[in-house]
Protein backbone atom coordinates (compact mmCIF):
# COMPACT_ATOMS: atom_id res chain seq x y z
CA UNK A 1 0.00 0.00 0.00
CA UNK A 2 1.40 3.35 -0.94
CA UNK A 3 0.57 5.57 1.96
CA UNK A 4 -0.83 8.84 0.77
CA UNK A 5 -3.12 11.06 2.72
CA UNK A 6 -5.91 10.26 0.27
CA UNK A 7 -5.50 6.51 0.67
CA UNK A 8 -5.34 6.92 4.38
CA UNK A 9 -8.54 8.92 4.54
CA UNK A 10 -10.28 6.39 2.32
CA UNK A 11 -9.11 3.44 4.35
CA UNK A 12 -10.06 4.94 7.66
CA UNK A 13 -13.42 6.10 6.35
CA UNK A 14 -14.11 2.55 5.17
CA UNK A 15 -13.37 1.33 8.66
CA UNK A 16 -16.04 3.70 9.96
CA UNK A 17 -13.48 5.87 11.68
CA UNK A 18 -12.60 9.49 11.41
CA UNK A 19 -9.44 10.01 9.39
CA UNK A 20 -6.53 12.21 10.28
CA UNK A 21 -6.48 15.78 9.20
CA UNK A 22 -8.71 18.74 9.64
CA UNK A 23 -12.33 18.06 10.39
CA UNK A 24 -14.82 20.83 10.20
CA UNK A 25 -17.11 21.24 13.15
CA UNK A 26 -20.12 20.20 11.11
CA UNK A 27 -18.54 16.84 10.45
CA UNK A 28 -17.47 16.50 14.06
CA UNK A 29 -21.01 16.99 15.27
CA UNK A 30 -22.20 14.32 12.84
CA UNK A 31 -19.94 11.61 14.25
CA UNK A 32 -21.92 8.86 15.89
CA UNK A 33 -21.20 7.98 19.51
CA UNK A 34 -19.01 4.92 20.10
CA UNK A 35 -21.08 1.85 19.38
CA UNK A 36 -21.10 -1.02 21.83
CA UNK A 37 -20.22 -3.44 19.03
CA UNK A 38 -16.46 -3.83 19.01
CA UNK A 39 -14.12 -1.89 16.83
CA UNK A 40 -11.85 -4.41 15.13
CA UNK A 41 -8.17 -3.68 15.58
CA UNK A 42 -6.26 -6.25 13.60
CA UNK A 43 -2.52 -6.09 13.75
CA UNK A 44 -0.89 -6.51 10.37
CA UNK A 45 2.50 -6.36 8.77
CA UNK A 46 2.47 -4.11 5.69
CA UNK A 47 4.61 -2.02 3.36
CA UNK A 48 4.30 1.76 3.62
CA UNK A 49 5.92 4.67 1.82
CA UNK A 50 7.79 6.41 4.63
CA UNK A 51 10.67 7.85 2.59
CA UNK A 52 11.60 8.66 -1.00
CA UNK A 53 13.20 5.22 -1.20
CA UNK A 54 11.29 1.98 -1.76
CA UNK A 55 8.26 1.26 0.43
CA UNK A 56 9.38 0.28 3.91
CA UNK A 57 8.71 -3.37 4.66
CA UNK A 58 7.52 -4.71 8.01
CA UNK A 59 5.58 -1.64 9.08
CA UNK A 60 3.08 -2.72 11.74
CA UNK A 61 -0.42 -1.32 11.88
CA UNK A 62 -3.81 -1.82 13.54
CA UNK A 63 -5.62 -1.47 10.24
CA UNK A 64 -5.26 -1.89 6.53
CA UNK A 65 -3.67 1.49 5.95
CA UNK A 66 -0.26 2.62 7.12
CA UNK A 67 -1.12 5.00 9.91
CA UNK A 68 -3.28 3.25 12.53
CA UNK A 69 -6.86 4.39 12.86
CA UNK A 70 -7.64 7.42 14.98
CA UNK A 71 -10.13 6.20 17.55
CA UNK A 72 -12.88 8.50 18.75
CA UNK A 73 -14.67 7.74 22.00
CA UNK A 74 -17.09 9.77 24.06
CA UNK A 75 -16.56 10.61 27.69
CA UNK A 76 -18.53 8.22 29.91
CA UNK A 77 -19.91 6.16 27.01
CA UNK A 78 -19.13 2.46 26.54
CA UNK A 79 -16.38 1.57 24.11
CA UNK A 80 -15.42 -1.89 22.89
CA UNK A 81 -12.60 -3.16 20.72
CA UNK A 82 -11.47 -6.60 19.66
CA UNK A 83 -7.74 -7.03 19.19
CA UNK A 84 -7.08 -9.64 16.50
CA UNK A 85 -3.43 -10.52 16.35
CA UNK A 86 -2.35 -10.97 12.74
CA UNK A 87 1.38 -10.73 13.35
CA UNK A 88 3.87 -13.40 14.31
CA UNK A 89 4.59 -11.94 17.75
CA UNK A 90 2.46 -11.91 20.91
CA UNK A 91 0.85 -8.55 21.64
CA UNK A 92 -1.70 -6.64 23.77
CA UNK A 93 -3.22 -3.14 23.77
CA UNK A 94 -2.61 -0.56 26.48
CA UNK A 95 -4.94 2.47 26.48
CA UNK A 96 -2.39 5.05 27.54
CA UNK A 97 -3.77 7.64 29.96
CA UNK A 98 -7.31 6.27 30.06
CA UNK A 99 -8.34 5.22 33.55
CA UNK A 100 -9.66 1.78 32.65
CA UNK A 101 -10.46 -1.16 34.95
CA UNK A 102 -7.27 -3.11 35.70
CA UNK A 103 -8.25 -6.11 33.55
CA UNK A 104 -8.43 -3.83 30.50
CA UNK A 105 -4.99 -2.28 30.99
CA UNK A 106 -3.14 -4.52 28.56
CA UNK A 107 -0.03 -5.38 30.57
CA UNK A 108 0.93 -9.02 29.95
CA UNK A 109 1.50 -11.20 33.03
CA UNK A 110 0.43 -8.46 35.42
CA UNK A 111 -3.17 -8.20 34.20
CA UNK A 112 -3.77 -10.26 31.05
CA UNK A 113 -2.28 -13.10 29.00
CA UNK A 114 -0.37 -12.65 25.79
CA UNK A 115 -2.48 -12.54 22.63
CA UNK A 116 -0.71 -14.86 20.21
CA UNK A 117 -0.94 -14.80 16.42
CA UNK A 118 -4.45 -15.76 15.35
CA UNK A 119 -5.90 -15.16 18.81
CA UNK A 120 -8.02 -12.27 20.01
CA UNK A 121 -8.76 -10.30 23.16
CA UNK A 122 -11.83 -8.15 23.85
CA UNK A 123 -11.43 -4.79 25.52
CA UNK A 124 -14.43 -2.88 26.89
CA UNK A 125 -14.61 0.19 29.12
CA UNK A 126 -16.14 3.65 29.39
CA UNK A 127 -13.48 6.38 29.35
CA UNK A 128 -14.12 8.62 32.37
CA UNK A 129 -12.04 11.52 31.07
CA UNK A 130 -12.23 13.61 27.90
CA UNK A 131 -9.03 14.54 26.09
CA UNK A 132 -6.24 13.24 23.89
CA UNK A 133 -4.94 9.74 24.61
CA UNK A 134 -3.29 6.96 22.62
CA UNK A 135 -2.98 3.21 22.36
CA UNK A 136 -0.09 0.86 21.84
CA UNK A 137 1.05 -2.69 22.60
CA UNK A 138 2.61 -3.52 25.95
CA UNK A 139 4.64 -6.44 24.74
CA UNK A 140 7.89 -6.45 22.84
CA UNK A 141 7.23 -2.71 22.70
CA UNK A 142 10.49 -1.46 21.30
CA UNK A 143 10.07 -3.62 18.19
CA UNK A 144 6.30 -3.31 17.86
CA UNK A 145 6.01 0.42 18.56
CA UNK A 146 9.25 1.12 16.71
CA UNK A 147 7.67 -0.48 13.66
CA UNK A 148 4.59 1.73 13.97
CA UNK A 149 2.07 0.03 16.23
CA UNK A 150 0.64 3.16 17.90
CA UNK A 151 -2.55 5.17 17.41
CA UNK A 152 -4.18 8.31 18.78
CA UNK A 153 -7.44 8.38 20.75
CA UNK A 154 -9.70 11.38 21.07
CA UNK A 155 -12.23 11.21 23.88
CA UNK A 156 -14.85 13.79 23.06
CA UNK A 157 -16.81 15.86 25.52
CA UNK A 158 -20.11 17.22 24.17
CA UNK A 159 -19.62 20.26 26.42
CA UNK A 160 -16.35 21.28 24.77
CA UNK A 161 -16.06 24.81 23.38
CA UNK A 162 -16.62 25.05 19.63
CA UNK A 163 -13.60 25.03 17.32
CA UNK A 164 -13.63 25.67 13.58
CA UNK A 165 -11.29 22.77 12.79
CA UNK A 166 -9.53 19.92 14.49
CA UNK A 167 -6.20 18.39 13.49
CA UNK A 168 -4.88 15.23 15.14
CA UNK A 169 -1.22 14.35 14.80
CA UNK A 170 0.72 11.21 15.70
CA UNK A 171 4.37 12.20 16.09
CA UNK A 172 7.01 9.54 15.68
CA UNK A 173 10.34 8.60 14.18
CA UNK A 174 11.48 5.52 12.32
CA UNK A 175 14.87 3.85 12.40
CA UNK A 176 15.44 3.39 8.69
CA UNK A 177 18.61 3.00 6.64
CA UNK A 178 19.35 4.80 3.37
CA UNK A 179 17.35 2.19 1.48
CA UNK A 180 14.28 3.06 3.56
CA UNK A 181 14.27 -0.29 5.38
CA UNK A 182 14.36 -0.84 9.14
CA UNK A 183 17.73 -1.03 10.84
CA UNK A 184 18.34 -2.30 14.39
CA UNK A 185 16.00 -0.60 16.86
CA UNK A 186 18.57 0.27 19.48
CA UNK A 187 22.21 0.43 20.47
CA UNK A 188 23.01 -0.61 24.04
CA UNK A 189 25.34 2.37 24.58
CA UNK A 190 22.47 4.73 23.70
CA UNK A 191 19.96 2.79 25.81
CA UNK A 192 22.24 3.58 28.76
CA UNK A 193 21.94 7.30 27.92
CA UNK A 194 19.11 9.17 26.15
CA UNK A 195 17.84 6.21 24.13
CA UNK A 196 18.41 5.53 20.43
CA UNK A 197 16.90 8.09 18.07
CA UNK A 198 15.11 7.33 14.84
CA UNK A 199 16.46 8.48 11.49
CA UNK A 200 13.26 9.58 9.73
CA UNK A 201 10.82 11.93 11.43
CA UNK A 202 7.11 11.95 10.65
CA UNK A 203 3.73 13.38 11.61
CA UNK A 204 0.92 10.95 10.76
CA UNK A 205 3.53 8.84 8.89
CA UNK A 206 4.24 11.81 6.58
CA UNK A 207 7.03 14.33 6.28
CA UNK A 208 5.61 17.75 7.20
CA UNK A 209 1.97 17.18 6.24
CA UNK A 210 -0.20 20.23 5.63
CA UNK A 211 -3.79 20.59 6.80
CA UNK A 212 -6.35 23.25 5.97
CA UNK A 213 -8.16 25.28 8.60
CA UNK A 214 -10.50 28.28 8.17
CA UNK A 215 -8.72 31.66 8.01
CA UNK A 216 -9.27 33.66 11.17
CA UNK A 217 -10.77 30.56 12.80
CA UNK A 218 -9.84 28.64 15.93
CA UNK A 219 -8.14 25.32 15.25
CA UNK A 220 -7.72 22.63 17.85
CA UNK A 221 -4.47 20.77 17.34
CA UNK A 222 -3.99 17.53 19.23
CA UNK A 223 -0.57 15.89 19.09
CA UNK A 224 0.53 12.63 20.70
CA UNK A 225 4.20 11.73 21.01
CA UNK A 226 4.18 8.05 20.21
CA UNK A 227 7.89 7.90 19.51
CA UNK A 228 9.90 5.49 21.64
CA UNK A 229 12.75 7.92 22.40
CA UNK A 230 12.45 11.54 21.34
CA UNK A 231 11.70 14.46 23.67
CA UNK A 232 10.21 17.44 21.81
CA UNK A 233 10.24 21.19 22.49
CA UNK A 234 7.15 22.65 20.82
CA UNK A 235 6.69 26.05 19.27
CA UNK A 236 4.06 27.45 16.92
CA UNK A 237 5.12 29.99 14.29
CA UNK A 238 2.81 32.16 12.22
CA UNK A 239 -0.15 32.39 14.58
CA UNK A 240 -1.19 33.04 18.13
CA UNK A 241 -1.44 29.72 19.99
CA UNK A 242 -2.23 28.60 23.52
CA UNK A 243 -1.73 25.29 25.30
CA UNK A 244 -5.21 24.30 26.46
CA UNK A 245 -4.59 20.74 27.67
CA UNK A 246 -1.70 18.39 28.37
CA UNK A 247 -1.82 14.63 28.75
CA UNK A 248 -5.58 14.51 28.39
CA UNK A 249 -6.34 17.15 31.03
CA UNK A 250 -7.09 20.87 30.67
CA UNK A 251 -4.33 23.16 31.96
CA UNK A 252 -5.44 25.46 34.81
CA UNK A 253 -3.75 28.45 33.13
CA UNK A 254 -3.31 28.65 29.36
CA UNK A 255 0.12 29.59 28.06
CA UNK A 256 2.04 29.99 24.79
CA UNK A 257 3.93 26.85 23.71
CA UNK A 258 7.32 28.52 23.87
CA UNK A 259 9.69 25.53 23.57
CA UNK A 260 7.44 23.48 25.84
CA UNK A 261 9.17 20.14 26.44
CA UNK A 262 7.16 16.94 26.26
CA UNK A 263 8.44 13.39 26.13
CA UNK A 264 7.34 10.03 24.75
CA UNK A 265 3.80 9.19 25.83
CA UNK A 266 2.75 12.82 26.38
CA UNK A 267 0.05 14.74 24.52
CA UNK A 268 -0.25 18.39 23.60
CA UNK A 269 -3.49 20.25 22.87
CA UNK A 270 -3.30 23.68 21.33
CA UNK A 271 -5.84 26.31 20.40
CA UNK A 272 -4.48 28.11 17.33
CA UNK A 273 -5.97 31.33 16.03
CA UNK A 274 -5.47 30.99 12.28
CA UNK A 275 -4.21 34.04 10.36
CA UNK A 276 -6.78 36.19 8.56
CA UNK A 277 -5.05 35.95 5.19
CA UNK A 278 -6.02 33.14 2.86
CA UNK A 279 -3.00 30.92 2.18
CA UNK A 280 -1.04 31.96 5.29
CA UNK A 281 0.94 29.10 6.82
CA UNK A 282 1.20 28.20 10.50
CA UNK A 283 3.86 25.72 11.54
CA UNK A 284 4.22 23.40 14.49
CA UNK A 285 7.92 23.03 15.23
CA UNK A 286 10.22 21.04 17.41
CA UNK A 287 12.96 23.45 18.49
CA UNK A 288 14.86 21.05 20.76
CA UNK A 289 18.49 20.46 19.96
CA UNK A 290 20.52 21.83 17.10
CA UNK A 291 18.25 20.85 14.23
CA UNK A 292 14.83 22.52 14.65
CA UNK A 293 12.21 20.75 12.61
CA UNK A 294 8.86 21.70 11.11
CA UNK A 295 6.56 18.85 12.12
CA UNK A 296 3.36 19.88 10.35
CA UNK A 297 1.72 22.99 8.93
CA UNK A 298 -1.76 24.48 8.82
CA UNK A 299 -2.91 26.57 5.87
CA UNK A 300 -5.53 29.27 6.27
CA UNK A 301 -8.40 28.85 3.80
CA UNK A 302 -11.42 30.98 2.91
CA UNK A 303 -12.56 34.36 4.16
CA UNK A 304 -11.55 35.24 7.72
CA UNK A 305 -13.91 34.05 10.44
CA UNK A 306 -12.48 36.81 12.66
CA UNK A 307 -12.50 34.70 15.81
CA UNK A 308 -10.63 35.58 18.97
CA UNK A 309 -8.61 33.18 21.11
CA UNK A 310 -9.84 34.98 24.22
CA UNK A 311 -13.44 34.08 23.44
CA UNK A 312 -12.70 30.41 23.80
CA UNK A 313 -14.40 28.92 26.86
CA UNK A 314 -12.60 26.74 29.40
CA UNK A 315 -12.38 23.01 28.91
CA UNK A 316 -14.24 21.10 31.58
CA UNK A 317 -11.98 19.50 34.20
CA UNK A 318 -11.98 15.70 34.29
CA UNK A 319 -13.48 13.95 37.34
CA UNK A 320 -10.17 13.21 39.06
CA UNK A 321 -10.33 12.90 42.86
CA UNK A 322 -8.65 15.71 44.81
CA UNK A 323 -5.72 14.56 46.96
CA UNK A 324 -6.04 15.18 50.67
CA UNK A 325 -2.57 16.65 51.29
CA UNK A 326 -2.87 16.65 55.06
CA UNK A 327 -3.78 12.96 55.21
CA UNK A 328 -1.51 11.87 52.35
CA UNK A 329 1.10 9.15 52.88
CA UNK A 330 4.50 9.61 51.24
CA UNK A 331 6.05 7.31 48.67
CA UNK A 332 9.73 7.94 47.94
CA UNK A 333 10.70 7.07 44.40
CA UNK A 334 14.30 7.44 43.24
CA UNK A 335 15.33 7.01 39.61
CA UNK A 336 18.92 5.96 39.15
CA UNK A 337 21.41 4.31 36.85
CA UNK A 338 22.61 0.88 37.94
CA UNK A 339 26.24 0.46 38.85
CA UNK A 340 26.49 -2.78 36.98
CA UNK A 341 24.55 -4.38 34.20
CA UNK A 342 22.57 -7.42 35.33
CA UNK A 343 21.44 -9.22 32.18
CA UNK A 344 17.69 -9.93 32.08
CA UNK A 345 16.02 -12.89 30.45
CA UNK A 346 14.50 -11.23 27.40
CA UNK A 347 10.86 -12.25 27.84
CA UNK A 348 8.30 -9.92 26.26
CA UNK A 349 10.80 -7.48 24.92
CA UNK A 350 13.17 -6.97 27.82
CA UNK A 351 16.33 -5.92 26.09
CA UNK A 352 18.72 -8.10 28.02
CA UNK A 353 20.38 -5.24 29.93
CA UNK A 354 19.68 -3.40 33.15
CA UNK A 355 21.00 0.12 33.00
CA UNK A 356 18.32 1.72 35.19
CA UNK A 357 16.59 1.22 38.51
CA UNK A 358 13.67 2.50 40.58
CA UNK A 359 14.46 2.63 44.30
CA UNK A 360 17.65 0.75 43.47
CA UNK A 361 15.82 -2.23 41.96
CA UNK A 362 16.05 -2.79 38.19
CA UNK A 363 12.93 -4.46 36.81
CA UNK A 364 14.03 -7.93 35.85
CA UNK A 365 11.93 -8.06 32.70
CA UNK A 366 8.30 -8.88 32.12
CA UNK A 367 8.71 -12.31 33.57
CA UNK A 368 5.87 -14.56 34.70
CA UNK A 369 7.07 -13.85 38.22
CA UNK A 370 7.48 -10.08 38.52
CA UNK A 371 9.17 -8.55 41.52
CA UNK A 372 7.06 -7.36 44.40
CA UNK A 373 5.21 -4.06 43.90
CA UNK A 374 7.06 -0.86 44.66
CA UNK A 375 4.32 -0.08 47.19
CA UNK A 376 0.94 -1.40 48.18
CA UNK A 377 -1.58 1.43 48.21
CA UNK A 378 -4.82 1.46 50.16
CA UNK A 379 -7.94 1.97 48.09
CA UNK A 380 -9.25 5.51 48.65
CA UNK A 381 -6.12 6.77 50.44
CA UNK A 382 -4.24 9.91 49.29
CA UNK A 383 -0.53 9.64 48.46
CA UNK A 384 2.28 11.98 47.57
CA UNK A 385 4.99 10.45 45.43
CA UNK A 386 8.35 12.11 46.13
CA UNK A 387 10.09 11.39 42.85
CA UNK A 388 13.76 12.18 42.48
CA UNK A 389 15.91 11.95 39.35
CA UNK A 390 19.44 10.90 40.25
CA UNK A 391 20.47 10.47 36.62
CA UNK A 392 21.85 13.04 34.13
CA UNK A 393 18.97 12.34 31.70
CA UNK A 394 15.29 13.32 31.44
CA UNK A 395 12.66 10.62 31.95
CA UNK A 396 8.96 10.77 31.03
CA UNK A 397 7.60 8.70 33.92
CA UNK A 398 4.18 7.23 33.19
CA UNK A 399 1.70 5.80 35.68
CA UNK A 400 -1.05 3.46 34.51
CA UNK A 401 -4.63 3.50 35.76
CA UNK A 402 -4.65 6.67 37.86
CA UNK A 403 -4.07 10.37 37.26
CA UNK A 404 -1.83 12.41 39.52
CA UNK A 405 -1.55 16.13 40.18
CA UNK A 406 1.82 17.89 39.97
CA UNK A 407 2.20 19.58 43.37
CA UNK A 408 5.68 21.08 43.37
CA UNK A 409 9.14 20.82 41.83
CA UNK A 410 12.57 21.59 43.26
CA UNK A 411 13.74 23.24 40.04
CA UNK A 412 10.83 25.05 38.39
CA UNK A 413 7.50 26.75 38.78
CA UNK A 414 4.83 24.16 38.05
CA UNK A 415 1.13 24.47 37.39
CA UNK A 416 -1.07 21.98 39.26
CA UNK A 417 -1.40 19.88 36.11
CA UNK A 418 -3.34 16.64 36.18
CA UNK A 419 -1.50 14.01 34.18
CA UNK A 420 -0.39 10.42 33.70
CA UNK A 421 3.17 11.21 32.59
CA UNK A 422 5.72 13.56 34.19
CA UNK A 423 8.87 14.51 32.30
CA UNK A 424 11.39 14.76 35.13
CA UNK A 425 14.61 16.66 34.40
CA UNK A 426 18.10 15.78 35.67
CA UNK A 427 18.49 16.59 39.38
CA UNK A 428 14.82 17.45 39.75
CA UNK A 429 12.66 16.41 42.68
CA UNK A 430 8.93 16.53 42.16
CA UNK A 431 5.87 15.86 44.27
CA UNK A 432 2.98 14.10 42.60
CA UNK A 433 -0.29 13.72 44.49
CA UNK A 434 -2.87 11.04 43.82
CA UNK A 435 -5.81 9.26 45.31
CA UNK A 436 -5.45 5.47 44.99
CA UNK A 437 -8.97 5.03 43.65
CA UNK A 438 -8.50 2.33 41.01
CA UNK A 439 -7.91 -1.19 42.38
CA UNK A 440 -5.34 -3.45 40.75
CA UNK A 441 -1.71 -3.62 39.69
CA UNK A 442 -0.58 -0.46 37.92
CA UNK A 443 2.67 -0.16 36.07
CA UNK A 444 4.93 2.84 36.51
CA UNK A 445 7.74 3.26 34.02
CA UNK A 446 9.83 5.53 31.90
CA UNK A 447 8.27 5.92 28.46
CA UNK A 448 11.63 6.08 26.75
CA UNK A 449 11.13 2.46 25.86
CA UNK A 450 14.79 1.49 26.09
CA UNK A 451 14.81 2.82 29.67
CA UNK A 452 11.59 0.98 30.44
CA UNK A 453 12.96 -2.26 29.02
CA UNK A 454 16.35 -1.99 30.71
CA UNK A 455 15.16 -1.58 34.28
CA UNK A 456 13.17 1.64 34.77
CA UNK A 457 9.86 -0.08 35.46
CA UNK A 458 7.93 -1.05 38.56
CA UNK A 459 4.32 -1.14 39.73
CA UNK A 460 1.91 -0.14 42.47
CA UNK A 461 -0.66 -2.51 43.87
CA UNK A 462 -3.91 -0.83 44.93
CA UNK A 463 -6.03 -2.97 47.28
CU1 LIG B 1 2.11 4.09 27.21
CU2 LIG B 1 3.05 1.39 30.09
O1 LIG B 1 2.56 2.76 28.65
CU1 LIG C 1 13.94 7.25 31.03
Image (cartoon, helix red, strand yellow):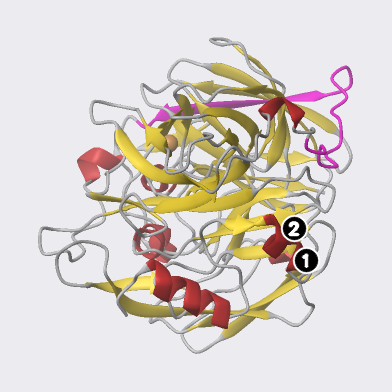
Asked whether the viewer can see residue 226, the reply is: no
**In the displayed structure, would residue 126 be above or below residue 307?**
below
Q: Residue 179 in magenta?
A: no
Instruction: Determine the secondary structure under disc 2.
Output: loop
Residue that lies at the very extreme toward the front in this rendered image: 303
Q: Secondary structure at mark 1?
A: strand
Question: At x 86% / y 30%, what residue is drawn?
Answer: 322
Q: Position of residue 348 (x, y in %)?
A: 43, 64
Q: Main secondary structure of the magenta part?
A: loop
Quadrant for ligand 2 reads top left
Q: Residue 125, labelled with which disc?
A: 1
Question: Quadrant of residue 125 in the image?
Answer: bottom right
Q: Which residues are magenta?
A: 315-338
Q: Which residue corresponds to the image point at 66% horizontal and 48% vertical from the top-left?
A: 164
Which quadrant of the view contains residue 46? Answer: bottom left
Task: Say whether marks 1 and 2 touch (CB < 8 Å).
Answer: yes
354, 121: nearer the viewer: 121
Q: Nearer the viewer, residue 91 or 153?
A: 153
Image quarter of the N terminus: bottom left
Identify the residue under disc 2: 100
Q: Give me the C-alpha separation between circle 1 and circle 2.
A: 6 Å
Few, some or many residues within 10 Å of mark 1 (<14, 14–19, 20+): some
Amino acid sequence: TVLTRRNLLKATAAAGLAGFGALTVGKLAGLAAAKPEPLILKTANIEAKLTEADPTKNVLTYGEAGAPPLIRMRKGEPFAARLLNGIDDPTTIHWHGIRVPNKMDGVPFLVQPYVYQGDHFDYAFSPPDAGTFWYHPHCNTLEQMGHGLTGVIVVENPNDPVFDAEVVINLRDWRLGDDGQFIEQFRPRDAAKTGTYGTVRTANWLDQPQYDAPAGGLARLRAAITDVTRIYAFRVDGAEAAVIALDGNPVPQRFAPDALQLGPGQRLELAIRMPDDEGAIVSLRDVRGTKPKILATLRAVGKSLKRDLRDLGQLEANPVAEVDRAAAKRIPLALSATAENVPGDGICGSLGYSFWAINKVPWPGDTPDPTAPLAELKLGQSYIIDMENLTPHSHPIHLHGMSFKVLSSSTRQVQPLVSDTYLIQPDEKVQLGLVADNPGDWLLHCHIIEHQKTGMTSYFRVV
